[in-house]
C-alpha cells in the first residue's frame, strides 16, 4: 500500500530506490573485474530504508552497519564519494581510511559506521542522550540486522534507552527469512530463542511493531509514529521490518544471480524470467512500490523508464569517477589518528 | 609426508585430536557450515554434535567454553576475526586465564581460542588488527602463532592437549599457502615454547612469527646478495617464548632485529627487546631494532594497507642500521624508526 | 536444612566481626538474610551437581557442604585456605562438594555455568548446574546472551536470581523498568517462577521442579527469589540509601525464624544454633592459627608449567 | 584502606595562592571546574573515588550539579557506548568505569569504536570523551579488582593516556583532557587519594606530553608513573643517604609520551630504572626500555632495569600481594644493581 504522501514525494522516493538499486548493481559489476574487498549490498531492502529515512530531518543522526550503502544514498550522500571510498581512493568520503564497512558522512547525519555486530547500538543511544541533555529536538536511529539481537550490547542499549526515555528508534531489518545457514522459514531462528523478535522488547515497556518491509505504507506509518514519539519525549521505539534476503546476497560475496533489475517487470509480468519469478513478482519491495504507483496512476511506464535511465547513467558516472580517482599518498596513513 | 594448505592443516589437526579425545568440542559462528574460510568444513559430518554453531555472542560463548573446560571438556572456540575477541576480554582476562591460580590448582581450564587476523584484503579497522601483545601481558595465558602448515597442525594439537587456555593465532594471508605435513604415523606434536631456526646465519639475527616470517626470509635472501648472512628464527610460540634459542643466536651474531605485523608501540617486540637487552647486554654490539606497523588503526585503502604492513625492505633497512652501528662508543646513526610521540 | 542455615548465619556474623577487627582484608559481601535461598537450592541438588556463585557466595558454598575451617582460612588469606590464600572471599572454590567458583565480576559467572551444563550433555552424567546472581546482573549483556543460548541448546541449568532489590547502592528501579527478571526468561521460552526467598521450603520446591526438568532433558529453569540482605552491599557500607523502616520490616521476616515456625522446629533450633556457633568458633581458631599465605607459593599454579 | 580525616572540606589557602589538597580533593576540584566551565560536560557513573571514604566528594558534586551526573545501570558496554554517542553529538562526557578490571567488559567499545572513529571516518567525526578507571593493587583486591590495563590501552592507536601522580597534576591534566577533542584514558591509583600536595588556586591546565622532573639527580634516572612516582621519590630519598643522587622523571602522560625528556635525563645520568605497576611482560616499562635503548644506546653505561608487577594474577593474601607489587625496596635494589 502507498504511504499517505503527495505524489511528487512518492515519485522522489521511487527515484531514490532506483538510484540505490543501480548503485549496488554497478558495484557488483565493478567487483567482477576489480579487487575491491568484501562488501554488502542493500538490494531488496530499498522499500524499507527509503520511506523510513525520508522522515528524518537535518540534525537527526543514523548509525548503520556493514549493509549501509542504501541508507547513505537515502539521506542524500554522494554515490561518487561512496564508490571512491569503497575503492579506497583519496576522493572517498573517509579519504580511503574506512572503506565500505565504515562509510561515513557526518554532514548527512552518519557520524560513523561500525562493523562490529551490535557495536553501534549503545552509540546511537548516546547521541539520543546528548540531544535530551542539550534540549535539541532531534532523533537518533539505530539501523541493524536481526543478528545484533544476539549480542549483549543490544540488551544493555534497550534497557538504558527505556530508562532514560531517550529519543532513539531501533529499526531492525530482519532479512533472515530464507537466510543462509538457517533452515528457511523456521522460527525460532536457530540462533535466537525468542519466538518473535518483538518479544525481546516487551519487558522494557517500549512500543514495538513488526511489519512487512516491502509495505511502504506500513514502514512510513510506523516510522512516523516512532519519530513523533521520540520528538515529543515519549521515548524509544522498536520496529522490525521483515524482508526476504535477495538471492544474490546468499553467497559470501554478492553476485547478480537474479540478473539486473528490469523496471518493465512491473508492468509486463511476462518478461519476468521463470528462474527467479518468486523474487521479482512477490519479494522485491522496489518493484512492489513501482506497481502500486502505476496502479494509482501516479506514474507512467515511460516516466519510470526515464527515471531508471537517469539512475543508471548517474551510477555509471559514479563508478567511473571512483575508478579514475587517485589513491591516497601512503603517508596519509599517519594522519587523523588524533583530532 | 603430504602437501596441505595451511587451512587444511588446521582442519586436520582438529580432526586428529577429536578422534583421539572424545572431550574435544568445537564452538563458533557457522562452524558446522565450515566458517568463512572453511577451517571446519566437513568436521560436522564426522563428529556430529561435537561441532556446534553458536549465536553471535562472543562474550558468553568464550565464558561458556571456560565453564565447559573447568567441567571436563576441551573446547576449541573459533573467533572469526581477532578484532572481536575484545567483546570476550572479561571472560578471558578475569576468568579463563586466572581460574587455576585463584583456586590454587583446584580448577584448570584446558581450552583453545582460534582467532584469525592481520591486515590483508582491505577489510578496514575492525577486521585487520594484530592484537597478540595484549595477551603477552596476561599471566596464565599461552599464545602460539604458526607460520607453516606443519606447525599449524602440530601447534594446534599441542594447544588442544595443553591443560591451560591457549590463544592460537592464525593469519588469513597464510591460509592458502601449501607445505609439507607429516602423515599419520610419523606425526610429531610441535612443543609449545620452542622456537626454530629457519635459516642459519652469523652476521645478525632476525626473529619473527606468523605471516611476517615470509618477509623475514625474503629480507635474509636480500641481505645475502650483499654477503650478509642473517639468521632467521621463527618464534612459533609468543608466550612462553624460547629465550634460550634467542640468546644462543644473539650470542653468536651480537645483533638482533625483531619484526612483527602489529603496531610497534607496546608490541611483543618491546618485550623481546627489553628481555634480550637485560640478559645479553654484554653480547649486544648494537641496540635491538624493532620493525612493526606505524601507530595507526589499520587503514582500508590497498595503498595505505601496504604502507601499514612492514615488508622485507623495512627489515633490510633495520638490519643495515643495526649492522652500521659501530661497536660501542661510536656515534650512533639515527634509527630509521621515527621517535613516536 | 536448619543446621546448615544456622552454620551460614554464624559464619557470616563471625566474618563480619573479623572484618571489623581487620583480620580479613579486601572486599567482603555477606549474605546474612539470604540463607533460605542457599540452603533451599542446595538441598535440591545431588553431589554430582555443580553450583556457581557470585560475589556474595559464602552461603552457597557452605550450603553445599564446604568445610567452614578451610573457607574461613581462605577469606582470612591463610595458606590452609581452599585456594591457598590466593582467591579470597570473591574467588572461593570447593569443587569436592560441587561448589565450583565464585566471581568478582557482576554476571561473570553465568556463562561459566552454561559451560558446565554443556559438559554434562556430552558426558551424560545427568548432572545439573545451578548459577546464582543478584538482580544487578539482570542488566548485563552476558545475562541476555546466556538466557538465549541456554534456551536454544536446552541446557540442564538453574538460573537462581537473588533479587534483593538493590544493585550496589541504587534500588533496582533506578536501573531498569523491569521489576521481575523472570520476565526476561519468559521471553526466551524459559519456564520462570518467583518465590519468597525467605521461605526455604518454597525455594526447595521450586528448585526440585527445575532439577527434575533439567534431568529429564527439559532444559533450563529460572527461579527468582525475592529476598533482602540485612547487611550493606559490602562490609563498611553505611547503607544510608535504605530507609531504616524498610530494614526493620524485613528483620521480622528473617528466614531462620520463618523456617523454624513453618516446620515446627522450635525445640531443636537453640541446640542447632549452639552447634553451629561452636563449629564456627573452632574454624576461627584454626584459621587464625594457620600460617599466612607465604610468598614462595606465589609463582605456582599460574599455568601448568610456570611461564616467563 | 586507611580512613583519612575527611572532615575538612574547604581547602586551606596559603599565602602564595595555592592550597594543600589531597589527591582526591584535587580530582574533585578538577571535576567541579570542568563542569562549571563548560555546560556540555557530563559525568557518567559515580565511583570516581572507588569505595573509599572520599566517595562523599561525588555526593558534593552531585548536589552542586544535580542534572549533570548520570548513574547508569551495571552495563558497561551500554554506558561506555552511550558516552561515545553523546561525545559524537555535542556533549563532553567523563565516563567512570570504576575498578580497572571492569574495563574488559566494554573493551570493544573503547578500542574498536572510540579509538578508531576519527581515523576511519577520515577525520569527519570527533569523540571528545574521558574514560576513568581506578587502577592498581589496593590491598585485598585479588585477581579481579587489582588490574592496571594502561599498557594494553597504550598499545591502541587513537586514545591518549594520562596517569597523574599528584593532586596538582590530576587537576591540571583533567582540565586539559576534558577540553581535548579525542578519547582520553585516565587511570588513577586508589592509594594516591590520601597524598597531600600544593595545588594552585588559579585554574591551571597542564599540557599532555610534557614530563616533569619531580626530583633532580645525577647518578641514575628513575622513570615512574602514577603511584610509582611516589615510590620512586621514596627510593630516591633512601638512596640519597648513601650518597647516590637519583633523578625522578614523571612522564605524567603515556600518549603523547615525552621521550625527549627521558632521553635527556638518561644522557646526563647514563643509567635508567623504570618502575610501573603493570605486569612486567609487554608492560609500560618494556616500551620505554626498548625506545630508550634504540635512541640512547651509547649513553647507557648499564642495562636498563624494569621494576614492575610480577607476571602472576594478583593474589589475595597480603604478604603475597606485597611480594608481587613494585615496592620502594625493589626500586632501591634495582638502582644499586646498576651502580654496584
Image (cartoon, rainbow, N blue to C red):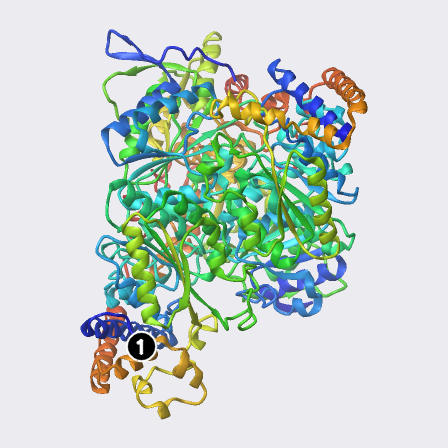
Find residue B190 and report its horizontal and vertical position in percent.
Answer: 68, 53
In x, y percent, where is residue D15?
24, 6
Disc 1 residue crowd, few under 14, some 14–19, many 20+, Cα 10 Å: many
Name which residue lies at 71% across and 62% down. B16
- Residue D236 seen in this snapshot: yes
D22 to A281, vertically: above or below: above
- Side (left or right) of C94 relative to B307: right
The quarter in which the C terminus of chain B is drawn is: top left
Along the viewing direction, whichever of B196 and A148 lies nearer the viewer: A148
Between C211 and B213, the one lying in front of the other is C211
Q: Is residue A306 left or right of residue C185?
A: left
Residue at 68%, 33% (x, y): give it. Answer: C36
- Quadrant of the rendered structure where residue C106 is? top right
Secondary structure beneath disc 1?
A: helix
Q: Is residue A321 placed above or below A238 in the rendered structure?
A: below
Counting from the top left corner in percent of width and height, residue D172 is at 30, 25
According to the picture, the residue beneath numbered tag 1 turns out to be A289
Residue B201 shows in the view: no
Q: Is residue D133 above or below residue D199?
A: below
- Please state the horizontal and vertical placement of residue B218, each as a whole percent of the image: 48, 58
Q: Is residue C152 left or right of residue A250?
A: right
Identify the residue at image location x=38%, y=89%: A272
> Numbered disc 1: what chain?
A
- Residue D182 placement: quadrant: top left
Near-viewer residue (C33 or D52):
C33
Amino acid at each position: 500500500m502507498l504511504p499517505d504522501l503527495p505524489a511528487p514525494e512518492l515519485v522522489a522516493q521511487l527515484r531514490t530506490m532506483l538510484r540505490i538499486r543501480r548503485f549496488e548493481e554497478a558495484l557488483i559489476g565493478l567487483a567482477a573485474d576489480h579487487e575491491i574487498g568484501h562488501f554488502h549490498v542493500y538490494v531488496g531492502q530499498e522499500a524499507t530504508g527509503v520511506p523510513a529515512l525520508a522522515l528524518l530531518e537535518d540534525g537527526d543522526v543514523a548509525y548503520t552497519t556493514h549493509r549501509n550503502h542504501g541508507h547513505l544514498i537515502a539521506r542524500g550522500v554522494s554515490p561518487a564519494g561512496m564508490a571512491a571510498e569503497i575503492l579506497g581512493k583519496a576522493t572517498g568520503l573517509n579519504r580511503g581510511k574506512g572503506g565500505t564497512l565504515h562509510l561515513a558522512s557526518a554532514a548527512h547525519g552518519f557520524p560513523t559506521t561500525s562493523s562490529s555486530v551490535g557495536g553501534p547500538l549503545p552509540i546511537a543511544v548516546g547521541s539520543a542522550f546528548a540531544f535530551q541533555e542539550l534540549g535539541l529536538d532531534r532523533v537518533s536511529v539505530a539501523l541493524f540486522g536481526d543478528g545484533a539481537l544476539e549480542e549483549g550490547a543490544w540488551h544493555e542499549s534497550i534497557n538504558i534507552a527505556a530508562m532514560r526515555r531517550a529519543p532513539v528508534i531501533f529499526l531492525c531489518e530482519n532479512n533472515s527469512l530464507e537466510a543462509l545457514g538457517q533452515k528457511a522459514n523456521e522460527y525460532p531462528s536457530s540462533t535466537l530463542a525468542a519466538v518473535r523478535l518483538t518479544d525481546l522488547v516487551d519487558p522494557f515497556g517500549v512500543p514495538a511493531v513488526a511489519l512487512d518491509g516491502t509495505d511502504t505504507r506500513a514502514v512510513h506509518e510506523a516510522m512516523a509514529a516512532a519519530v513523533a514519539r521520540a520528538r515529543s519525549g515519549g521515548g524509544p521505539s522498536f520496529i522490525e521490518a521483515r524482508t526476504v534476503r535477495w538471492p544474490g546476497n546468499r553467497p559470501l560475496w554478492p553476485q547478480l544471480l537474479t540478473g539486473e533489475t528490469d523496471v518493465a517487470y512491473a508492468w509486463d509480468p511476462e518478461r519476468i524470467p521463470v528462474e527467479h519469478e518468486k523474487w521479482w513478482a512477490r519479494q522485491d519491495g522496489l518493484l512492489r512500490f513501482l506497481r502500486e504507483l502505476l496502479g494509482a496512476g501516479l506514474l507512467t511506464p515511460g516516466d519510470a523508464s526515464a527515471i531508471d535511465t537517469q539512475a543508471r547513467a548517474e551510477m555509471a558516472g559514479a563508478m567511473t569517477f571512483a575508478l579514475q580517482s587517485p589513491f591516497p599518498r601512503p603517508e596519509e596513513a599517519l594522519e587523523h589518528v588524533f583530532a | 609426508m603430504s602437501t596441505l594448505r595451511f587451512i587444511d592443516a588446521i582442519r586436520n589437526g582438529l580432526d586428529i585430536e577429536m578422534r583421539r579425545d572424545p572431550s574435544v568440542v568445537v564452538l563458533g559462528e557457522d562452524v558446522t557450515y565450515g566458517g568463512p574460510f572453511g577451517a571446519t568444513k566437513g568436521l560436522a559430518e564426522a563428529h556430529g554434535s561435537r561441532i556446534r554453531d553458536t549465536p553471535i555472542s562472543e562474550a558468553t560463548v568464550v565464558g561458556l567454553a571456560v565453564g565447559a573446560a573447568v567441567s571436563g571438556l576441551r573446547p576449541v572456540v573459533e573467533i572469526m576475526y581477532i578484532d572481536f575477541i575484545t567483546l570476550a576480554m572479561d571472560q578471558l582476562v578475569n576468568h579463563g586465564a586466572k581460574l587455576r591460580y585463584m583456586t590454587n590448582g583446584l580448577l584448570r581450564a584446558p581450552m583453545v581460542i582460534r582467532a584469525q587476523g592481520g591486515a590483508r584484503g582491505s577489510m578496514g579497522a575492525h577486521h585487520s588488527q594484530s592484537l597478540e601483545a595484549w595477551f603477552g601481558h596476561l599471566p596464565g595465558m599461552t599464545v602460539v602463532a604458526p607460520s607453516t602448515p606443519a606447525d599449524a597442525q602440530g601447534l594446534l594439537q599441542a594447544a588442544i592437549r595443553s591443560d591451560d587456555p591457549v590463544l592460537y593465532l592464525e593469519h588469513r594471508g597464510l591460509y592458502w599457502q601449501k607445505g609439507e605435513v607429516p602423515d599419520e604415523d610419523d606425526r610429531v606434536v610441535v612443543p609449545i615454547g620452542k622456537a626454530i631456526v629457519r635459516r642459519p646465519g652469523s652476521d645478525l639475527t632476525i626473529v619473527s612469527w606468523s605471516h611476517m616470517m615470509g618477509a623475514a626470509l625474503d629480507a635474509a635472501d636480500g641481505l645475502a646478495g650483499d654477503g650478509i648472512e642473517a639468521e632467521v628464527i621463527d618464534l612459533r610460540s609468543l608466550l612462553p617464548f624460547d629465550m634460550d634459542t634467542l640468546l644462543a643466536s644473539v650470542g653468536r651474531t651480537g645483533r638482533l632485529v625483531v619484526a612483527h605485523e602489529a603496531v610497534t608501540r607496546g608490541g611483543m617486540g618491546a618485550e623481546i627487546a627489553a628481555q634480550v637487552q637485560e640478559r645479553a647486554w654484554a653480547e649486544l654490539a648494537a641496540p635491538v631494532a624493532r620493525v612493526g606497523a606505524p601507530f595507526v588503526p589499520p587503514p582500508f585503502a590497498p595503498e595505505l594497507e601496504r604502507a601499514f604492513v612492514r615488508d622485507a625492505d623495512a627489515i633490510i633497512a633495520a638490519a643495515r642500521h643495526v649492522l652500521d652501528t659501530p661497536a660501542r662508543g661510536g656515534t650512533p646513526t639515527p634509527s630509521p624508526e621515527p621517535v613516536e610521540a | 536444612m536448619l543446621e546448615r542455615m544456622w552454620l551460614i548465619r554464624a559464619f557470616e556474623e563471625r566474618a563480619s566481626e573479623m572484618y571489623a577487627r581487620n583480620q580479613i582484608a579486601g572486599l567482603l559481601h555477606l549474605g546474612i538474610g539470604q540463607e533460605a535461598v542457599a540452603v533451599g537450592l542446595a538441598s535440591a541438588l545431588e553431589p554430582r551437581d555443580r553450583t556457581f556463585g557470585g560475589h556474595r557466595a559464602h552461603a552457597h558454598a557452605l550450603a553445599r557442604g564446604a568445610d567452614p575451617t578451610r573457607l574461613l582460612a581462605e577469606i582470612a588469606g591463610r595458606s590452609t585456605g581452599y585456594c591457598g590464600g590466593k582467591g579470597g572471599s570473591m574467588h572461593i572454590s570447593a569443587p569436592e562438594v560441587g561448589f565450583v567458583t565464585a566471581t568478582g565480576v557482576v554476571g561473570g559467572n553465568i556463562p561459566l555455568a552454561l559451560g558446565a551444563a554443556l559438559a554434562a550433555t556430552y558426558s551424560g552424567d545427568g548432572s545439573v548446574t545451578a548459577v546464582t546472581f543478584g538482580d544487578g546482573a539482570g542488566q548485563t549483556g552476558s545475562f541476555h546472551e546466556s538466557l538465549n543460548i541456554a534456551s536454544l541448546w536446552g541446557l540442564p541449568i538453574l538460573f537462581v536470581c537473588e533479587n534483593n532489590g538493590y544493585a550496589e547502592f541504587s534500588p533496582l528501579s533506578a536501573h531498569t523498568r523491569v521489576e521481575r527478571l523472570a520476565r526476561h526468561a519468559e521471553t526466551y521460552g524459559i519456564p520462570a517462577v518467583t518465590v519468597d526467598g525467605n521461605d526455604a521450603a518454597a525455594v526447595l520446591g521450586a528448585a526440585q521442579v527445575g532439577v527434575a526438568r533439567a534431568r529429564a532433558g527439559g532444559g533450563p529453569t529460572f527461579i527468582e527469589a525475592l529476598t533482602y540482605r540485612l547487611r550493606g552491599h559490602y562490609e563498611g557500607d553505611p547503607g544510608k540509601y535504605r530507609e531504616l523502616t524498610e530494614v526493620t520490616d524485613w528483620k521480622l521476616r528473617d528466614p531462620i525464624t520463618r523456617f523454624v515456625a513453618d516446620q515446627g522446629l522450635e525445640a531443636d533450633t537453640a541446640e542447632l544454633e549452639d552447634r553451629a556457633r561452636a563449629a564456627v568458633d573452632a574454624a576461627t581458631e584454626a584459621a587464625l592459627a594457620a600460617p599466612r599465605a607465604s610468598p614462595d607459593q606465589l609463582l605456582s599454579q599460574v599455568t601448568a608449567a610456570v611461564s616467563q | 584502606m586507611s580512613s583519612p580525616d575527611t572532615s575538612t572540606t574547604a581547602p586551606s589557602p596559603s599565602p602564595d595562592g595555592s592550597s594543600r589538597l589531597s589527591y582526591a580533593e584535587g580530582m574533585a576540584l578538577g571535576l567541579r571546574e570542568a563542569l562549571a566551565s563548560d555546560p556540555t560536560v557530563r559525568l557518567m557513573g559515580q565511583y570516581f573515588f572507588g569505595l573509599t571514604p572520599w566517595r562523599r566528594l561525588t555526593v558534593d558534586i552531585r548536589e552542586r550539579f544535580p542534572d549533570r551526573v548520570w548513574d547508569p545501570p551495571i552495563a558497561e558496554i551500554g554506558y561506555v557506548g552511550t558516552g561515545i554517542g553523546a561525545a559524537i553529538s555535542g556533549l563532553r562526557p567523563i565516563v567512570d568505569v570504576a575498578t580497572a578490571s571492569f574495563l574488559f567488559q566494554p573493551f570493544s567499545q573503547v578500542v574498536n569504536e572510540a579509538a578508531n572513529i576519527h581515523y576511519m571516518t577520515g577525520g569527519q567525526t570527533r569523540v571528545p570523551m574521558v574514560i576513568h578507571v581506578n587502577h592498581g593493587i589496593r590491598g585485598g583486591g585479588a585477581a579481579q579488582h587489582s588490574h592496571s590495563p594502561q599498557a594494553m590501552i597504550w598499545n591502541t592507536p587513537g586514545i591518549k593516556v594520562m596517569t597523574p601522580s599528584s593532586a596538582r597534576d590530576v587537576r591540571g591534566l583533567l582540565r586539559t583532557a576534558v577540553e581535548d577533542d579525542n578519547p582520553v584514558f585516565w587511570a588513577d591509583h586508589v592509594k594516591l587519594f590520601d597524598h597531600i600536595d600544593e595545588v594552585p588556586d588559579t585554574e591551571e591546565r597542564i599540557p599532555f606530553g610534557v614530563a616533569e622532573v619531580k626530583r633532580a639527580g645525577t647518578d641514575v634516572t628513575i622513570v615512574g608513573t602514577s603511584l610509582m612516582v611516589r615510590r620512586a621519590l621514596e627510593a630516591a630519598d633512601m638512596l640519597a643517604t648513601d650518597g647516590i643522587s637519583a633523578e625522578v622523571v614523571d612522564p605524567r602522560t603515556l600518549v603523547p609520551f615525552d621521550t625527549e625528556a627521558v632521553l635527556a635525563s638518561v644522557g646526563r645520568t647514563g643509567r635508567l630504572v623504570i618502575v610501573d605497576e603493570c605486569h612486567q611482560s609487554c608492560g609500560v616499562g618494556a616500551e620505554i626500555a626498548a625506545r630508550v635503548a634504540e635512541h640512547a644506546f651509547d649513553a647507557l653505561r648499564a642495562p636498563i632495569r624494569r621494576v614492575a608487577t610480577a607476571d602472576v594474577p594478583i593474589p589475595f593474601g597480603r604478604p603475597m600481594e606485597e611480594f608481587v607489587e613494585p615496592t620502594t625496596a625493589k626500586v632501591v635494589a634495582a638502582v644499586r644493581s646498576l651502580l654496584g
